[in-house]
Amino acid sequence: MTYDRESLQASWKRTRAHLDAARAHLMDRPGIDLSTTREFLEHNELGLAFDCMVHLADDLDLPLSFWQHMDRAAREMRLYSDEPHTPHRKAAASCLRHLAVASEHE
């Protein structure tokens, strides 16, 4: 699938908005260092920022809205795949698990 530059930039903007909204849930948590995530976002490394945020959030009890934003970012980046060697596969799978659990608690 090919994208023109304008479509790609619009997708990046939507992804970034979801990652920023999710990151807001982590900003007030004590002991959470978001410097690496911020650096990835500054360099438009959105997949790496996604991985980092899922890793940081794995052991936290975050609200459904955090995981919904992460899920929307993953979908925008097309991270969900059954291919065994897909980049970001573990983080995407973890995101889906957390989304399911958080949905059950709501």
Image (tube, grey):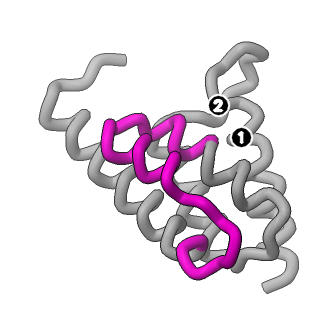
Q: Circle 2 sits in a helix, a strand or a loop, which is it?
A: loop
Quadrant in the picture for residue 80? top right
Q: Are marks 2 and 1 in contact (CB under 8 Å)?
A: yes
Pick out the residue farthest to the top: 85
The CA span between labels 2 and 1 is 5 Å
Check if residue 39 falls in the magenta segment. yes
Quadrant in the picture for residue 6? top left
Of 67 and 2, which appears nearest the observer? 67
Q: Which residues are magenta?
A: 26-51
* Residue bearing the label numbered 2: 88
Q: Which mark, by number, is residue 102?
A: none
Q: Circle 1 sits in a helix, a strand or a loop, which is it?
A: helix
Q: Residue at x 53, y 36 (%)?
A: 48
Q: Residue at x 65, y 77 (%)?
A: 29
Quarter holding the C terminus is bottom right
Number of residue marks: 2
Of 17 and 24, which appears nearest the observer? 24
User: Of the residues shown, which amino acid type is indicated by label 1?
Assistant: Ala
Q: Residues within 10 Å of mark 1 (few under 14, many from 20)?
A: many
Q: Residue at x 62, y 23 (%)?
A: 87
Residue 46 location in percent, x, y?
44, 40
Q: Is residue 8 left or right of residue 85?
A: left
Vertical side of 78 occupied by 50: above or below: below
Q: Is residue 78 left or right of residue 98?
A: left
Check if residue 95 falls in the magenta segment. no
Q: Residues within 10 Å of mark 2 (few under 14, many from 20)?
A: some
* Residue bearing the label numbered 1: 91
Quarter holding the N terminus is top left
Q: Is residue 47 left or right of residue 83?
A: left
Q: Residue at x 45, y 70 (%)?
A: 21
